[in-house]
Image (cartoon, rainbow, N blue to C red):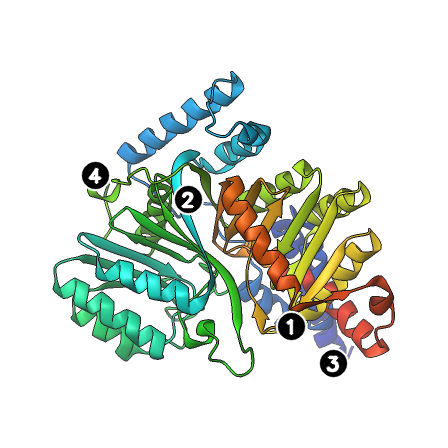
Amino acid sequence: MGIYTILVSLIVLLNLILGVSIIFLERKNASSTWAWLMVLLFIPILGFFLYLIFGKPISKRRIFVWDSKSRLGLKAAVQSQLRAIETDELEYQDSDIARYNSLIYLNLRTDASLFSQDNAIEVFLDGKEKFDRLLQDMRRAKDHIHLVYYIVRDDELGTKLADVLIKKANEGVTVRFLYDAMGSRSLSKKYIKRLRASGVEVEAFFPAKIFNFKINYRNHRKLAIIDSKIGYIGGFNIGDEYLGKNKKFGYWRDTHLRVRGSAVENMQTRFILDWNQASKQEIHYEDRFYQAEAAGDAGIQIVSSGPDQELEQIKTGYIKMILEAKDYIYIQTPYFIPDESVRDALRTAALSGVHVKVMIPNKPDHPFVYWATLSYSGDLLQAGGEVYIYQNGFLHAKTMIVDGKVATVGTANIDVRSFRLNFEVNAFIYDKEITKELEQAFHEDMEHATQMTKKLYDRRSLGIRFKESISRLLSPVL
């Protein structure tokens, strides 16, 4: 037996062992397992190292730890709301919300997401307006500013933000700034040193030490909490492109919320959990972080999900909203790569006569993701859904609206990465006025969109069909 025959036999044997390992590690997700086995088949040995970097499931140990005082208080409040729904005793300020008590119950069960009805919401569709208001609120901060963003750029907007944070820190305001190490990998050390030198506490989420085996698990959340009274949540990151200054993408169309009311306390809890995971300077329970004031009558639940959990809470909330729809579902997402459960829910809704409209961008920021998005859009068209392609720049909003009564806005896209790999956070909104405002924005965006009809989709070239097929095959690991 020659040396090459022995070498090939060893590679085949080792590949078999690695393949069996992947099967057992990924045994709860068949589509992802098959995708990684294909990678291993076509790229022997190297494929397994790629799996260790991009595909290995994150540890199921608890990586977010909350102190006992807060945990016990939260648990008691959640149990109280669950019992109130079970006994039909939860009082709704808007009687129409009672129709969605099972969605509220679901979010309480899966994510301990308290339901509050004393909130005021302001919707931002434009980056300049959002950041002008955020910076204004931060300049007025008296006690603390807490920020977590996936992408932070060292550009004009990033510098303007840093200037405000430094000024407030010098005034004695507690300023904590958490960024994702991968999303903000281009952020300069000079930028971070300048913040820290001025008293701003800065931490990175899952930073690389020697080698980062958590590179595929990113904190995709965008939250800002100011004095525990004002909270921001949505899709805008920090960078000039989000102000429409990038020539490639042009105008940046996104959705962000400014919230006042008890929901801000739930956003605060999310930030503290994330911060304590990343920092040795842990935040302990303090009353000053929980002093939200009633500001309106909008109902909100703040729902988080991440690869450390098995329930995929935001995705489950999406599915429940879809199943509750009677008349219409409007979705805006930059990436439309639904897994089988979401795909089946949308197809079932469309086949049941519910008007399902999905709006996606007209240009890719990630080519494989874009072609996969087109492929799954074709599936929806086959079921009678409608697909619109936004033409006025880049669409980055993550919004779902159902029947003009309930909506969700946040950081989670309709894709496998948001469902299983990223740490995400969404606001589930139970308010007809805000939902109608989001719906109006959708209709206005339709004026800048072209409809992808089934006839047009069927005419796509052989080259596009090939790109879609390859991208769809890889979709579980994109």
The answer to which of marks 2 and 3 sits earlier in the sequence is: 3
Q: Distance between the residues labelled 2 and 4?
A: 25 Å
User: In which image quadrant can residue 197 be found?
Assistant: bottom left
Q: In this view, does 258 lie to the left or right of 92?
A: left
Q: What is the crowding at mark 2: few (fewer than 14 residues within 10 Å), some, or many (at least 20)? A: few
Q: Residue 240, relative to residue 60: is it above or below? A: below
The secondary structure type at the circle numbered 4 is helix
- Circles 3, 1 touching at the beta carbon (< 8 Å): no
Residue underneath mark 4: 287
- The picture places residue 287, in percent across and down from the top left corner, at 21, 39
Q: What is the crowding at mark 3: few (fewer than 14 residues within 10 Å), some, or many (at least 20)? A: few
Kindly identify the residue that appears in the image at 55 percent across and 60 percent down: 397
Foreground: disc 1 or disc 4: 1
Foreground: disc 2 or disc 4: 4
Residue underneath mark 1: 391
Residue farthest top in this picture: 87
Residue underneath mark 3: 4
